[in-house]
Each structure stands twice: as structure tokens, then as C-alpha cells.
Image: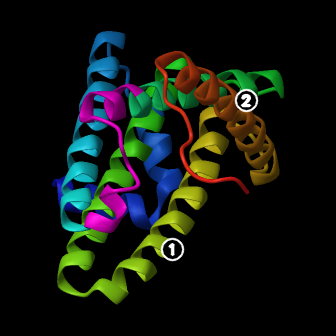
Amino acid sequence: MTPGQFIATSLRDPAGVARRLTAVALPSGILWQMAALVTILSVLVLELGLLLSPTEASMVAASPFTLCVILGSSLVMMVAAIFWTGRMIGGQGRFAAAILLIVWWQGMALVIQVVQTVALLLFPPLAGIVTLAGLAWLVFALLHLVNVLHGFDSLLKSLGTVVIGVLGISFGLALLLALIGVTLQGGTL
């Protein structure tokens, strides 16, 4: 299967791709390298987007290294949150499969990010539509990958896993940002 076919299949049938990926057994070292690679590529595409949009660049005052730390930590927290939260409510997922599925999901987010950047360059009004469609697909795919990962019989259990996981990630990310000294800037509300 070519990368284009894989991306097209992922967009059409995220649950089917998730089922095939959970059957793959990769060493944990390879999985973490894949997570690092998708994080670095995401930061590079983000930086490119910021170069093309100076108004957004003024809102992001973090260095590429800091962005790597934030995105990488978020990815690790997401893997842990999806895995442990799903297990708490009766899921049967494996941690290695959770890493692979979240890396795949983040890779698809990267593809969407590239399409957004191209849309921003070629036809800026289209970038907003691409962003909304991409966000809808990411939520749809995340629910399906959690459903497949944990062997749930309902997307509602997946939704519960994601909601509880997002709350945990938010707390963890806020703590991480405070530890590395990132603060909110701006006026009073």
C-alpha cells in the first residue's frame, strides 16, 4: 500500500485502519521513535505555517524546542490518558497499540495541517473550511481508534474515555507549562 492509499484509506475507514494497526507488533523503541518523528514534523509544519501567517506568529512566543517539548509531552500524555482511562472503564487495549494508534492519529493530523498550510497559501478562505473538516475528522477518528483499541461495543464508551482523558491531559499540560515557565500573557478579562 502506497502512502497515498494509506492516507485515503485512513480518511475513509479509520476504524478499519485502527484494527489493522493493532495487529502490528513493533518494538517499543520503534514506537517511541515514531512518536518523536511525528512530533518534530508537526513542529516543522507549525513553524512553516507561522512564517506564512505573521499575525499568528505574534501569538506564539515559544521556541521550536519548547514547542517540541509541549507537543511531545502532549502526545505522551494522550497515549497514557487514552490507555489508562479506557482500562479503567473496562477496555482491553495494549499500551504499545495505544502508542501506535495515537502516532497514526497524530500523523493524520499532520497531513491535515499540511493541507491547511497549502490552502492558506493558495486560497486563504478555504483554510477555515479545511480546518473545520479536519477537526471533525480527527474527533471522529479518535473515537473509533479508542473503540478499536479497547474493544468497546459503543462509541459512547469511547467518548467517555476521551472526555476523561482530555481533562487529565489538560491538568498535566497545565502543570508541565507551569514547570517550564510558560505563562499566559495579555490583559485582564
In this picture the colour scheme is rainbow
Label 1 SS: helix
Name the residue tied to disc 1: 132
Cα distance in 3D space between marks 2 and 1: 27 Å
Magenta-highlighted stretch: main secondary structure?
helix
Residue toward you, 178 or 122 = 178
Residue 23 in view in this figure = no
Asked if residue 172 lies left or right of residue 73, the reply is right
Query: x%, y% of residue 92?
Result: 69, 24
Q: Would residue 149 be visible to someone looking at this image?
A: yes
Please report contact status of discs 2 and 1: CB closer than 8 Å, yes or no. Answer: no
Please provide percent x and percent y for residue 160.
80, 43
Residue type, numbered disc 2: Gly
> For residue 8, what is the image quadrant?
bottom left
Count of numbered labels shown in the rendering? 2
Verify whether residue 62 appears in magenta.
yes
- Apparent side of residue 106 relative to residue 148 in the rendered image (left or right): left
Q: Callout 2: 10 Å neighbours few (<14), some, many (20+)?
A: many
Instruction: Magenta stretch: give its range.
Output: 54-69
The residue under the point 70% across, 34% down is: 165
Residue at 81% over, 22% down:
88
The residue lying furthest to the front in this view is 187
Residue at 47% x, 36% y: name it: 102
What's the residue type where badge 1 is placed?
Answer: Leu
Residue 188 shown left or right of residue 14 in the figure: right
- Mark 2 or 1, nearer chain start: 2
Secondary structure type for disc 2? helix
In screen coordinates, is 46 left or right of 11? left
Q: Residues within 10 Å of mark 1 (few under 14, many from 20)?
A: few
Q: Which mark is residue 86?
A: 2
For the C terminus, which image quadrant? bottom right
Residue 170 - label: none
